[in-house]
Image: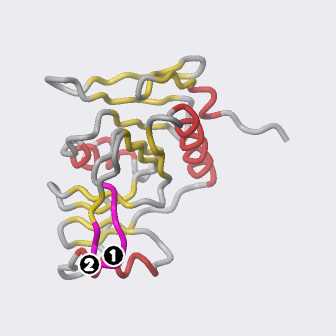
Amino acid sequence: MANAVTPSYVTLEAFWEAEETSESRHEWLDGVVYDMSRGTIEHARLIGSIVRILGNALLDECSVYSSEVMLYIAETKLATYADATVVCGPLATYRVAKLGEAITNPTLLVEVLSDRTEGYDRGEKFAYYMRISSLKEYVLVSQYERRIEVFRRPQRGRWIHEVAQAGQSLTLHGHAIEVDAVYAKPVR
């Protein structure tokens, strides 16, 4: 996680109000506000690709949201943004007065890895995400090689880890997703 940008406790309401007009993004963790790093062009392209592919695959069953939507994890008091969020079934949100709402029941979350965020996305942030009872799959997309990892919540025991690379596919919410399709660039 990045350095804190607030020297003292900030309420969730004050954070949300500031976030609505901020030119950059932040995370709120139990009263402390942290800068979120900016993504590269490739990072943004991969987010768009995975949102499009998941949206097409899950069209009739789930809603797919871009990184514009905030998540709120009450158990850990974390307000953050995932690169992609999928909700299957009714949407549950946490509303902060008239300021807005954040998703609280994701089924699947995606993070595109970068040098600055990979450790956090694999470690502390994943630990926060594991506390979300509705979360069934956590997906990590490499920005530097054709490699996608998925962590699945089993009925019991530890999360199951799978890796797919170039030329392979993996299953997300019961649908086969080709790794190469996520990384494909348009022909110009």
What kind of element bears circle 1? helix
Please provide percent x and percent y for residue 127.
22, 44
Label placed on residue 13:
2
State the residue at coordinates (18%, 79%). Answer: 9
User: Which is nearer the eye, 128 or 176?
Assistant: 176
Chosen colour scheme: secondary structure
Check the image and report above or below for 7 versus 144.
below
CB contact under 8 Å: marks 1 and 2: yes
Query: Whole-Å distance between the Cαs marked 1 and 2?
Result: 5 Å
What kind of element bears circle 2? helix
Label placed on residue 173:
none
Residue numbers of the magenta segment? 95-103
Left or right side of 51 for 127: left
Label placed on residue 16:
1
Give the amino acid type for the residue marked by disc 1 in the picture.
Answer: Trp
The quadrant of the picture occupied by the C terminus is top right
